[in-house]
Image (cartoon, rainbow, N blue to C red):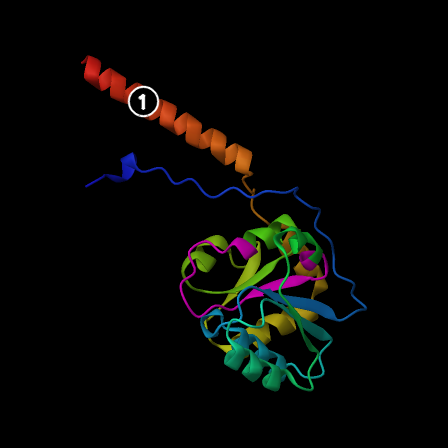
Amino acid sequence: LLSSDQLVHLKAGYPGPLRETRAPDAEAPLRVGFVGVLDHPKGVHVLIEAMHLLRGEPLELAIHGPLAMSPQYVAELRSAAGGYPISFRGRFESDEVDRVMAELDVLVVPSLWYESMPLTIHEAWRNGLPVVASDLGGMAECVTHGVNGLLFPSGDASALADTLHTLVHDRGLVARLANGRPVLQTVESVAQSVEELYSRCVEESVRGIAR
């Protein structure tokens, strides 16, 4: 078995430029988005249920993700979204991520399962957005509540609604959370760290053999 001092944790690096944070328009509806696979474990239905509880609030939800992977689930989502300010935008290409994020003020990650290290959270931060996420797994590890985003109990639509209600009525908090994003590693900086780690391991092995 390896001891803890033999382990090195290198986080993933992300391509693309770091974009400036921006304060949401206080006079316009808050633009909330989901970006990902439309499947039950991703918890999109929880987000739509939260929208039901926020009827009449200045809030819009844009759902970005492929519509053909789980047609029955998507049909249920569409039915539940009827009559609410919720739009289904469909799939998008990987080079369109920045465009998608630019149309949002807040990203919501309502997953019901233990995500490892959600790429969408880091893409949101790279694009200057705060994140609202379930308090599970990699999401809870990434998001520091009250610093770079907000956490809510997984599957709890009422708690999610309360969280979004707070952001709707405190646009300054949205801006502060966006500005609290962590330092993000680039692909290049992570590659350099990996190279340095391998070099150190080789040097230590050579010294061990020499002894």
Determine the residue positioned at 25% across, 16% down: 207
Q: Is residue 169 visible?
A: no
Determine the residue positioned at 53% across, 33% down: 189
Circle count: 1
Above or below: residue 204 compared with residue 115: above
Residue 181, position as x, y percentages in the image: 59, 49
Q: Quadrant of residue 30?
A: bottom right
Residue sticking out furthest to the right: 27
Residue under numbered circle 1: 202
- Placement of the N terminus among the 4 image quadrants: top left
Residue range highlighted in magenta? 100-120
Name the one closer to the observer, 156 or 48: 48
Q: Decide whether residue 116 is among the magenta residues.
A: yes
Tell me if 205 is positioned left or right of 86 in this view: left
Determine the residue positioned at 41% across, 67% down: 113
Residue 80, position as x, y percentages in the image: 59, 85
Q: Is residue 60 visible?
A: yes
Residue 208, position as x, y percentages in the image: 21, 19
Q: Amino acid at mark 1?
A: Val
Residue 103, position as x, y percentages in the image: 72, 61
Residue sticking out furthest to the front: 68
Above or below: residue 35 compared with residue 176: below
Secondary structure at numbered mark 1: helix
Q: Decide whether residue 140 is among the magenta residues.
A: no
Determine the residue positioned at 36% across, 37% down: 8
